[in-house]
Image (cartoon, coloured by chain):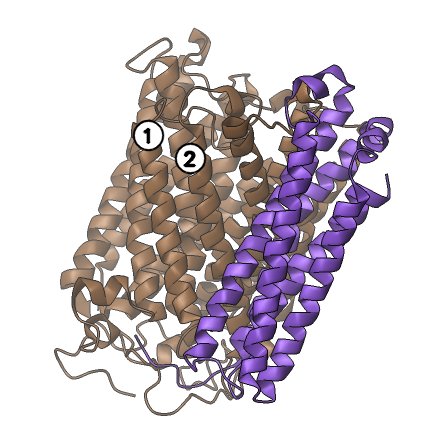
Chain colours: A brown, B purple
Amino acid sequence: MSNYPAGDRGFLGDPKAPGFLGWIFSTDHKRIGLLYFWAIVTFFCVGVLLGLLLRLELFSPGVDFMSAQTYNATFTLHGVIMIFLFIIPGIPAAFGNLIMPIQIGARDVAFPRLNLLSWWLYMIGALLAITSLFTGGGPPDTGWTFYVPFSTQTASNASLALFAVFIIGFSSILTGINFVTTIHRMRTTGMGWFRMPLFTWSLYATAWIQILATPVLAITVSLVMVERLLGIGLFNPTQGGDPVMYQHLFWIYSHPAVYIMVLPGMGVVSDIIPVFARKPAFGYKAIVVSSLAIAFAGSLVWGHHMYTSGMSDNAVLLFSFLTFVVAIPSAIKVFNWVTTLYKGSIALDPPLLYALSFVLLFSIGGLSGLVLGAASADVHVHDTHFVVGHFHYVMFGGAGFAFFAAMHYWLPKIYGRIYSKKLATIAWGFMFVGFNLLYLTMQIVGVKGMPRRYYNYLPEFTDLNRLATVGSWVLAIGLVIMFANLFHSVLRGTPVGPNPWGGASLEWQIPSPPPTDNFGENDPVVTHGPYDFKEAGIL
Amino acid sequence: MTPHLHKDYVGAKFGMWLFLFTELILFGGLFILYAVYLSRYPAAFIAAGAELDLRFGAANTLILLTSSLFVALSITALRLGKTRQSLWLLAATVASALLFLVNKFFEWSAKIQHGLYPASPELQAREIGETVYFNLYYLTTGLHGLHVLIGAVVIVWVMVFIRQQKVHRDDWVILENAGLYWHLVDLIWIFLFPLYYLVL
């Protein structure tokens, strides 16, 4: 299959849907994926700026340039933007839309118009979240967890932010429904369940969590809104309610949401490693089953966020045990990735570099998670910077680096142009060093006893905090180089053919950028697995 | 907008079922709260539950069950090509929905006249568990009432589609999905009715 004649830009320049309106009302999964992608990258950059400001305030003890209230609002925004606008939709909505239908040989998702509605809901939610900063009683200051009773009493504009979360949650549910239906119903001839690429499998597991967990968040934030607006407080002790019930309901969603964030990242890595090791994925079925096992077991561990909130010892023991159980499928994945690399013919291109950092950083994050999962240790480090460090290792080192890996892996496919590999590697170097400087230091200062969510700290923590802040600058330099390199490549990069990396899954068998209908006249017929490089004629 | 070249009925219904799961789980949050607070304040829940008027609840149960029958019959009618009959049956469903809401309005008004509404002086004078019960009662039945309203709007919308021949005897999956949604609204009530009116 040859690439296009010069000047044809595939779905990017579809003559049937020209101009800006042709994009924002498009039902093409690739266009919607790109709409998500650019929105998500924009919000990520805003979130990074807020994070840098937080680190800057922590450069010295005492007030540097933020009051306590401003600091509270800033970390709330940083959290809400990064969680609800970047990580949760990040890989599934952007790269899931762009790549998943092609990977299963479909021409679109099952419900294209619903897909467009999801994007609109996401943008409306994002707009409401931003509006909440400038209206009412000022930016919300509750933290992204919106714990009662503070969230029902604060004078800041929490109601609008909660409503924004509700809307974005609805968008997430609709995407989940769309993906599960698509994967069940739209696989092409020969695309059996166990011939699906592991990225698609991870999206399948993720979509189920989106469907089953997000409604709990919807009802929970609605109840907080109801108390703020109507005064009916089901979590309010003066009306017989129990604030701890809020935490239960919130984490029944928000812990599985952690797996909404990280499972797609695992899928990206599972797709990238075989291609760059030139070897079929080791333990394909084990990776599939472990994805489903994580989705299942991860739904039963929410209580480990609440060891210090007041729970019976039996419940603590049970949640602690279940938390350790989740480590098993996660470790199965890590072992399978490493074994795939073993004796492979490794090409250390940028996508693999980012994928490998995912494996390392996620492992560090996961292992520090076990410290928190053990109730006896958790009580001592609860609400310290150790938690913040752990969380960022899993979320940023995990989901974030997987998002970067996906960008370096698939953007050449989408735009038909490739970035400078040298600059991408330099950017990775800065980010990897800066990342560890920032978050490993946070974990250390946390073990030494520095609490989270304070703008101020004791003087003995000064050196470590300065080190972390310097790390945030190194990380930021890496991010700037990475994005500049990628954005430049989108416009002026070197043109590439259909299969720059030598992948065997379906997205590499069609031109770059893909045509609007993906596969031309005839639906593809699949005769081999996604990592059968020999059968695909690549090796 | 790209024309839909093929219609996947199984897929459309599959997607609807997934959506219905999410609705069930939405109410699930309130059911969890009901379970926890019932175990915490059993006596107060029993006392407050006795205040509800069984006749209102029973009438509404009957109305919703009948309306579910209307929807099911209207789908069969449309598939047999009896478009007029199908439309009349859907109109009967919408009428039932409105009747349900009117009934609910009178039930709530009566409660409010007796001083039984959230944060009322009457409730504050009683045991705190009764406040929890009535908070839950108003929020759960309120959310359900909202779903009745949404369901009625959806059915009216499908009726317009039938009139415009967009939904007809050979292409009726939209009507069937609307019917599924209506049955869900009915089903949730089937759980609310015993929880609030019967078992206490």
Indicate whether A407 appears above or below B139.
below
**How many labels, in total?**
2
Q: Residues within 10 Å of mark 2 (few under 14, many from 20)?
A: many
Which residue is at the far bottom? Answer: A522
For mark 2, name the chain: A
Q: Residue at x 58, y 53 (%)?
A: B147
Question: Which residue type carries mark 2?
Answer: Ala
Residue A150 vs residue B144, the one in the foreground: B144
Q: Can residue B128 be seen in this view?
A: yes
Mark 1 → mark 2, Cα distance in angstroms: 9 Å
Q: Is residue B88 left or right of residue B4?
A: right
Q: Which residue is drawn at 69% across and 40% down?
A: B107
Q: x, y (%) of residue A352?
A: 40, 59
Looking at the picture, how far across and down is residue A278, in whole percent? 45, 72
**Quadrant of the frame with the N terminus of chain A:** bottom left
Q: Is mark 1 on a helix, strand or loop?
A: helix
Q: How crowded is mark 1: few (under 14 residues within 10 Å), some or many (20 or more)?
A: some
- In the image, residue A115 sits, relative to residue A515, either above or below, namely above
Specify the label residue A133 is tagged with.
1
Identify residue for label 2.
A161
Quadrant of the image occupied by residue A336: bottom right
Pick the residue in front: B101 or A515. B101
Asked whether the residues under the numbered discs 1 and 2 touch, taking CB atoms below 8 Å apart as contact, a structural biologist would say no
| Nearest to the observer: residue B161 or residue A295 | B161
